[in-house]
Image: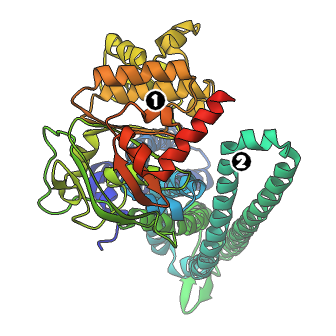
Amino acid sequence: MKRNTIGKYYLKYAHLFLIGIIADVIVDVVQTYVPEFLGAIVDIVSNNQNVVVADITYLLKNIILIATILMIGRAVLRFGIISASGRIEANIRHDMFRKAERLSQRYYHENKIGTIMSWFSSDVEAVEEFIGWGTIMMVDALFLSVIAIYKMIRLDPVLSFIAIIPLLALVIWGNRVEKVMSEKWEDRQKQFDKLYDFTQETFTGIRVIKAFVKEAQELKAFSKVAKENSEKNLEFAKLSIRFDVYIEMIIGVTFCLLMGLGAYFVYLTSIGTPFVLFNHTITLTAATLTTFVGYVDTLIWPMIAMGQILQMHSRFKTSSERIYAFLDQEEEIHNAENTVKLENCKGKITFNDFSFAYPDGDTHSLKNVSFTIEAGEMVGVVGKIGSGKTTLVNSLFHLYNVEKGKIFIDDIDIMDIDIQSLREAIAYVPQDNFLFSDNIRNNISFAKNKADMSEIRNAAKFADVDDNILGFSDGYETLTGERGVTLSGGQKQRISIARAYLKNAPIMIMDDAVSAVDMKTEETILNNINENRKGMTTIIIASRVSTVSHLDKILVLKDGSVEAFDTPENLLKISPTYQKMVYLQKLESEL
């Protein structure tokens, strides 16, 4: 498989990086003239009893000009590189989101949502930081160091060699430290994943926690996970700070050494006995020392930047590997070659000796299922909990790869049908009645782009929820809250039904979609289905026999197998499961 790399993003925004790098090089070149002008000022002051104001004014004007160029140049380089890094971050998130949409259900069974969210947040931020500020620091450190060292050597090669030795030692040592920091950052990120997982799971199950009065217990458990996360963060922070301190110490010692030696060499030069080292005579004046120290001072930033670059790179290396691993995940669900678009779908559905087991399951959820739903039929599906009802209808969406020759729509194998056209042909009311954290109007119109208000209200009337919505103070603009938390179970079910109906698909599947409504509302919805979906295939999974007793046919599942598939009248004669369900419902009604 072709491995994802960050290189393609650099190439996409190469023009912005080029603008930023050119500006950075100009800034670095211009910056190294400051020590020369300062040295010239010292030379004028020290060698002339009558200081020429015009000469100093000229030099000061040049320094101001340099400062202006530096200001503009740094603004341009930040615009180029930081702008590019922000766009790359957006591109990475976009690619990750698209990847997340294409991955199969199995992937989300095996990986926790909290862990995946940490890749989208902290890992992407670590990559963006290195691409942006890391690039600026690397260009700065490289060009500024080369230019400064070149000019230092021109002034005095031996003294330059003394100044460069600590820098070379820092590079070698930093390379070894970077490996350790990468390992610490990886440990930190793994612990961060656990914190994300725990938090996401806790907030998802907050109602259960409150209902069982387990707040204190969960808080204690969270404290333990948070403490472990804190410890990993502290380990990385301590190593990072220790590294920064060592860099500052090396810089300080180097600077003090050069100032002391430089002052001594200036003194020897002034008395006519310059210092000789390695057969090289070191001749330093106050002006030359000022210029040389200015170059060394210019080198301080690259040395500090090197430490920050190593830290950023250690985070980048670990985080990018985690992102690449996600982007390189195999996409199990994809169109086969020569796929067929499902056009003008009639709604005929055929299962031919179909068996299914979940990827992480040990047993088959469905076994040797065979039946045919003719186009336009309204069919009910009943059975005990765990009999495979939801698994059966989910198989129609190609959420998992199935064996060819087992499921057909309009006599076309679903494995040969274009996935998008397949799913567009099916309207679905899920069992959990998921709603987005948005207003009711947008939740219903999610099924159809640019649906007008009359269509939305018509769908709500179909689901017998229009009056309820108008009863809210904000009507259709009422916010549902996360996962529809502000609505009752029945209201969420009916809004989900309205959303599916608005799609006007040739096949409509309702998975236990009226279990939370009263009998009168259920009857209204079923009558609306019978009147408004004539000639279109409708499948209704139900826990109550009354919900499906008026439909054309009913499929009875038992332990993942088809016990019977016939009209409600015939099922009373041939299906023990259906007979028992009818009997229990009558008994419940009498009681």
152 in relation to 273, above or below:
above
Q: Residue at x 38, y 20 (%)?
A: 527
Q: Residue at x 48, y 46 (%)?
A: 578
Residue 571 to residue 279: above or below: above
Q: Which residue matches tag 1?
A: 496
Q: Residue furthest front?
A: 573
Callout 2: SS: helix
Q: Earlier in the sequence, mark 2 or mark 1?
A: 2
Q: Is residue 180 left or right of residue 27?
A: right
Q: Which residue is at a point 41% across and 47% down the rendered structure image?
A: 573
The amino acid at mark 2 is Thr
Displayed quadrant of residue 193: bottom right
x, y percent for residue 478: 54, 16
Front disc: 2 or 1:
1
* Residue neighbourhood size for the residue with mark 1, other residues' Cα within 10 Å, grouped as few (<14), some (14–19), many (≥20): many
In percent of width and height, residue 517 lies at 56, 25
Relative placement, left or right, of 504 versus 440 is left
Q: Is residue 42 left or right of residue 549?
A: right
Quarter of the picture containing the N terminus is: bottom left
Q: Nearer the viewer, residue 469 or 31?
A: 469
Query: Which three-letter amino acid code belongs to the residue tagged 1?
Result: Ser
Q: Is residue 52 visible?
A: no
**Residue placed under numbered mark 2 in the picture:** 202
Name of the residue lying farthest toward the bottom: 279
